[in-house]
Image: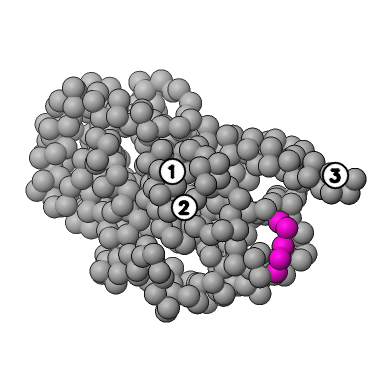
């Protein structure tokens, strides 16, 4: 049934994670034989200048605007949304209406918390089913709406929380968060180390600053990491060219340091590393669960990333650190204690749900088939 269906995937380019999820789902659907799949960054298409401005503020929230962003995020988690936030029920509606009219999708898959979509479907009386693919391990009310036919979530804990808010258990499926299949394949670690010019008898610390390279105090952190005996360091600077240039000027000649910009090979880097220091984005954490690389989550900001970090800490799947001095001490302990690494990997394995994209696409196919049968019965 999915082969002959028209599927609209909605996403948002605030951070890189939502785009990665929607791209993974699109690739999986095409592999299933579905040739009519449209992917839309709705807010950007509807209001390009305003969206670019708010995206800039979102990136700044990781450095200078943490309290402001946190206040907006937690206001939206309250049972009754604050009235200034109600504008999101209309933001992008005209563009969405035109998109639905022109494409006439059989189902809408949403990977970004946009209440405008279910609100539009409700007011238009549209029969188009809609599903939400939640991209974090914590719950925000913007994901929840009576028009949503299915929720695909990262954990059993998240499902329980949603049931507690009155959502039917039948509407919620614990699938994990969709990630690229390369993270779920087995690779020879020694070959990976050799391909990156790294020694197999020395530990590797992976320092990932996020897609936009927003992690602070990187020069000081790298200097401290190199002080750890026989430690090799890989730094991923994302799109932050200034950060990469700064680190290259200081450490570019050091054979124990590899400095990279944005890369599509994070699966390789995670697989060859003994420990990874990163921001707690939902997709990055899901990728780490697949690889089971020991995690240190550094300076999580208020909002969804803080919620992710607290959840992983509660499950023993990471260590949360807030200052550089504690960071180096924690890395040293984690690298030197194999039992600590093993325990964390086991805890991560218990949270991991494999092949999330395929599981979701299979369920979407079943929903479309049920919808077709329902229409036939109505005609008869």
Could you tell me if the residues under marks 3 and 1 are in contact, i.e. CB atoms within 8 Å?
no
Q: Which residues are magenta?
A: 124-128
Real-space Cα separation, disc 1 to disc 2, in angstroms: 11 Å
- Residue at the bottom extreme, as displayed: 84
| Identity of the residue drawn at 24% across and 41% down | 313
Query: Relative to 275, is 38 on the left or the right?
Result: right
x 55%, y 51%: residue: 132
Query: Can you tell which quarter of the image residue 102 is in?
Result: bottom right
Q: Residues within 10 Å of mark 1 (few under 14, many from 20)?
A: many
The answer to which of 365 and 51 lies nearer the viewer is: 365
Q: Give the percent coordinates (x, y) of residue 347.
A: 29, 29
Indicate the position of residue 181 as horizontal and vertical percent values.
Answer: 52, 33
Give whichever of discs 3 and 1 has the lower sequence position. Answer: 1
The percent coordinates of residue 335 (x first, y second) are 18, 30
Residue of label 2 = 166
Q: Which residue, given by chain and number where applicable, does mark 3 sit on?
A: 376
Camera-nearest residue between 311 and 348:
311
């Amino acid at each position: 049934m999915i082969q002959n269906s028209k599927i609209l995937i909605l996403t948002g380019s605030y951070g890189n994670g939502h785009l990665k999820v929607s791209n993974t789902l699109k690739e999986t659907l095409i592999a299933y034989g579905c040739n009519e799949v449209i992917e839309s960054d709705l807010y950007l298409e509807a209001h390009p200048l305003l969206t670019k401005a708010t995206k800039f503020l979102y990136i700044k929230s990781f450095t200078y605007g943490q309290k402001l962003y946190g206040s907006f995020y937690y206001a939206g988690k309250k049972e009754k949304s604050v009235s200034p936030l109600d504008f999101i029920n209309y933001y992008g509606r005209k563009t969405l209406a035109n998109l639905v009219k022109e494409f006439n999708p059989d189902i809408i898959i949403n990977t970004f918390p946009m209440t405008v979509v279910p609100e539009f479907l409700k007011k238009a009386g549209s029969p188009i089913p809609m599903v939400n693919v939640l991209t974090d391990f914590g719950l925000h009310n913007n994901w929840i709406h009576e028009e949503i036919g299915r929720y695909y979530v990262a954990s059993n804990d998240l499902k329980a929380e949603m049931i507690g808010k009155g959502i039917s258990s039948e509407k919620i499926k614990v699938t994990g968060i969709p990630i690229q299949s390369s993270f779920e394949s087995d690779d020879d670690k020694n070959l990976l180390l050799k391909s990156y010019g790294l020694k197999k008898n020395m530990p590797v610390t992976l320092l990932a600053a996020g897609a936009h390279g927003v992690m602070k105090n990187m020069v000081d952190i790298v200097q401290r990491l190199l002080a750890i005996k026989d430690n090799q360091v890989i730094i991923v600077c994302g799109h932050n060219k200034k950060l990469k240039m700064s680190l290259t000027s200081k450490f570019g000649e050091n054979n124990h340091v590899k400095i990279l910009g944005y890369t599509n090979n994070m699966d390789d880097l995670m697989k060859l590393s003994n420990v990874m220091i990163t921001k707690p984005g939902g997709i990055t954490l899901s990728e780490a669960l697949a690889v089971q690389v020991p995690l240190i989550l550094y300076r999580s900001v208020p909002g969804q990333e803080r919620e992710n970090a607290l959840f992983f800490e509660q499950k023993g799947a990471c260590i949360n650190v807030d200052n550089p001095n504690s960071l180096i001490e924690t890395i040293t302990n984690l690298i030197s204690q194999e039992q600590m690494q093993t325990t964390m990997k086991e805890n991560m394995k218990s949270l991991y749900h494999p092949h999330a994209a395929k599981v979701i696409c299979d369920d979407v196919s079943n929903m479309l088939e049920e919808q077709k049968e329902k229409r036939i019965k109505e005609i008869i």
